[in-house]
Image (tube, grey):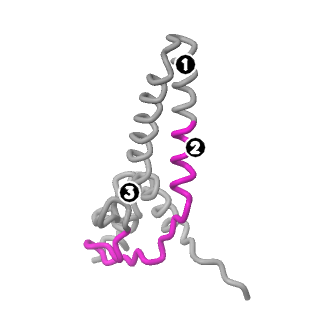
Amino acid sequence: MNRIATTPPPSPFSTGLRGRCPACGEGHLFRGFLAVKPACDACGQDFSAFDSADGPAFFVMSITGFVVAGTALWMEFTYEPPVWVHALVAGSLAIGLSLALVRPLKGVLAAVQFANKAEQGRFR
């Protein structure tokens, strides 16, 4: 029997964060760092309809901006470091957090699209 028909679908958050197929939880969602595969290797689920657009970028910028600004304020009031220290810490924190968050967030948004059966809007 087909695994998808006999068991409930996996959680969109766990599959998205791990970069797995939202239908079976086994196959890989990505073929590169951010490129989505055309279909799942394990179950054959078509991934061509997944389009997260600017969603991951918005969430990454919001989260990263909050963390970097909070860290900069904390550093300034606690240690009063020179500007170059702020630039070094903020720059490395912004780049590191952005790279660490963008792929999992794109996976979660794709998995949530699948779970909610989201599709392109159409006029009647």
Q: Comparing marks 1 and 3, which lies closer to the viewer?
A: 1
Instruction: Say above or below: 59 vs 21.
Output: above
Q: Which sits in the foreground, 65 or 88?
A: 88
Amino acid found under the numbered disc labelled 1: Trp
Residue 18 vertical placement versus 45 (above, below): above
| Circle 2: residue type | Ser
Q: Which residue is mark 1?
A: 74
Cβ atoms at labels 2 and 3 below 8 Å apart:
no
Say which mark, if any, is on residue 62. Answer: 2
Highlighted range, magenta: 36-65
Q: Position of residue 15 (x, y in %)?
A: 38, 57
**51 shown above or below 79:** below
Asked if residue 41 is among those painted magenta in the image, a careful observer would answer yes
Camera-side mark, 2 or 3 = 2
Of the pair 41 and 104, the residue shown nearer to us: 104
Q: Residue at x 54, y 71 (%)?
A: 117
The mark that comes first in sequence, 2 or 3, is 3
Tell me which label, 1 or 2, sits earlier in the chain. 2
